Amino acid sequence: MNSNDLYISIPEAPETVSAAGAIARLVDGLGFRYRLATDGLTENELSFKPTEQNKTLMQLLEHIHAMAKMSNRVFGGDVGEGPASDSFEDVRNDTLLQYYSMSTRLRNLSDEGLQKCAFKHPASETPLPFWNLINGQIADSLTHVGQISSWRRIAGNPQPTGRSVLLGR
């Protein structure tokens, strides 16, 4: 799938409500916001960091990418080999593909299947349920997407206007 077509808008909401469907919608919102926040970034923004203690914006994108891959794997995704290079475009494209792959699988996952999703994390001695992924990697990624939007504004390239995160288009 071509990542250029991903998250131009958020997919239609499902007709039925399920736990996995709700998480899929959260991931779709994350993918849409990520696409908006990263649209039109230049080398100036990618090398920007607000203070010496911060990561660069590119390092932040790499961190989000790693969390997207880990989250996708928890929900049964084949995360592949990753981006073709460490370039901004390749990291961005693979991150969008990870979110889309995860959301697609979640929309087709039963609540019983979701209940079985767990992951091993270095901070825990035992596998953690998918719930921890929501308040961990997914929430953390949303926070970082907000940082991208803020940092690019500080660096002089505000996020393009004319899109609605509420309506997903």
Image: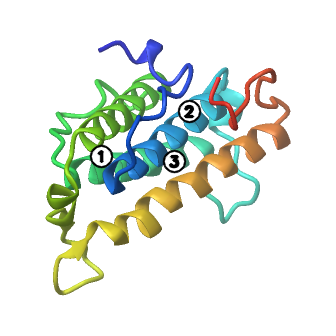
Q: Marks 2 and 3: which is nearer the front? A: 2
Furthest toward the bottom, the residue is 125
Q: Residues within 10 Å of mark 1 (few under 14, many from 20)?
A: many
Q: Return the disc, 2 or 3, that comes first in the chain's sequence.
A: 2
Q: Residue at x 64, y 29 (%)?
A: 36
Query: Which is nearer the N-term, disc 2 or disc 1?
Result: 2
Q: CA distance from mark 3 to mark 1?
A: 15 Å
* Viewer-closest of 29 and 66: 29
Identify the amino acid type marked 3: Gln
Nearer to the camera, 76 or 94: 76
Under mark 1, the amino acid is: Lys
Foreground label between 2 and 1: 2
Task: Check contact, mark 2 vs mark 1: CB within 8 A.
Answer: no
The answer to which quarter of the image holds residue 81 is: top left
| Above or below, comparing residue 15 to residue 119 in the picture | above
- Whether label 2 touches label 3, CB < 8 Å: no
Residue carrying label 2: 32
Circle 3 Cα neighbour tier, 10 Å, few/some/many (<14 / 14–19 / ≥20)? some
CA gap, disc 2 to disc 3?
20 Å
The image quadrant where one finds the C terminus is top right
Number of on-image labels: 3
**Residue 83: x %, y % from top left:** 31, 29
Q: Nearer the viewer, mark 3 or mark 1?
A: 1
Q: Position of residue 86 (x, y in %)?
A: 38, 32
- The circle on residue 69 is 1
Relative depth, front residue between 108 and 140 = 108
> Which residue in the structure is indicated by mark 3?
59
